[in-house]
Image: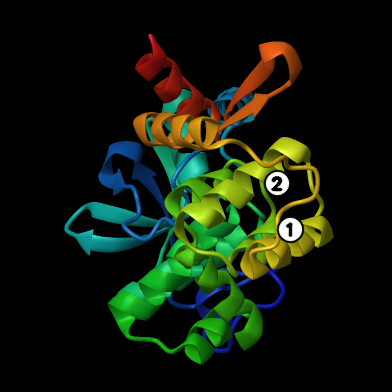
Amino acid sequence: MSKPRGLGRGLDALLGGDEVAPKDTLATLPVNAIRPGRYQPRSRMDETALAELAASIRAQGLMQPVLVRPIQADAYELIAGERRWRAAQMAGLMEIPALVREVPDEAALAMALIENIQREDLNPIEEAGGLQRLVDEFKMTHEQVADAIGRSRSATSNLLRLLRLAKPVQDMLMNRVLDMGHARALLALEGARQIEAAQRVAARGLSARETEALVKRLARGTPVRGRRQRDRDIARLEEELSDRLGTTVEIHHGAKGRGKLAVHYSSPEHLDELLTKLR
């Protein structure tokens, strides 16, 4: 395995490269002696990809050791390689190869973050959440966090700012409905206005630049082009439905009493919740 690029100073030696580091012990451990890492930043795993990895391990064995640290007698905690560990269990393996390394908590979190960042396994919210744990649990400054993960201070601060997004907007970012460019623009708004703008961006497929323009208009209080002035009854009904469903509802009232009712949702799970409320 080649050494990941862009590691922070002080963590390079901890992670090692092609060679087993002097403080590492290469061992074969029972899978049930290994626990998931407390500092795993990833909140979800692709079950299909996990099943495919399990099939590969079943056919060829586990080629790359997981990285663990001892936590008590005959018990270990994962630092890196949780997908491999879970897939090995699915494949029916009773033992797996592991590198055993003594590391402090903050190094374990930083190393878990780095592994996932280097593999591009984390979405921006998961990455930001992991960085925030370094700040909260280990009292690290943004500059220290940036150094630990090999990022610039500005890039690190921009990631951490994503945690100021409203929860529905964070969910849209996690589900790849929005990207980082959209999110950075939406930070200029707050609360319901931010959520409404995010849903509009997703519904219309706006680019990051178009999102910036939309946010500027909303921040100035300028009406968005193409939106008709609604009468008070329609506006009141929109507000009532939005409050009842907990999401943005738009009523487009046209000629001859015809129109369209638009209910916004941010993910398949959000849609299921709305359908349950409507039934």
Amino acid residing under circle 1:
Leu
Against 266, residue 197 (above or below) is below
Give the percent coordinates (x, y) of residue 206: 79, 47
Q: Position of residue 275 (x, y in %)?
A: 44, 16
Q: Is residue 100 left or right of residue 148?
A: left
Judge by depth and name the residue closer to the eye, 222 or 270.
222
**Which mark is drawn over residue 101?**
none
Quadrant of the image containing the C terminus: top left
Residue tagged 2: 201
Number of numbered tags placed on the structure image: 2
Viewer-nearest of labels 2 and 1?
Answer: 1
**Badge 2 element:** helix
**At x 64% / y 84%, what residue is drawn?**
154
- The answer to whether 162 is drawn above or below residue 267 in the figure is below
Residue 65 visible here:
no
Write the residue at 69% across / 77% down.
6
Say which amino acid is labelled 2: Val
- The residue under the point 41% across, 68% down is 109
Which residue is drawn at the image coordinates 36% and 46% (left, top)?
Answer: 29
Q: Using the image, determine if residue 201 lies above or below residue 105.
A: above
Compared with 73, 61 (above or below) is: above
- Image side of residue 243 versus residue 233, left or right: left
User: On the image, numbered disc 1 is attached to which residue?
Assistant: 214
Question: How far across and down, in percent of the image, does residue 41 sit?
Answer: 45, 57
First-in-chain label (2 vs 1): 2
Q: Residues within 10 Å of mark 1 (few under 14, many from 20)?
A: many
The answer to which quarter of the image holds residue 23 is: bottom left
Left or right side of 42 for 202 = right
The reply to whether residue 259 is visible in this rendering is: yes
Tags 2 and 1 in contact by the CB under 8 Å rule? yes
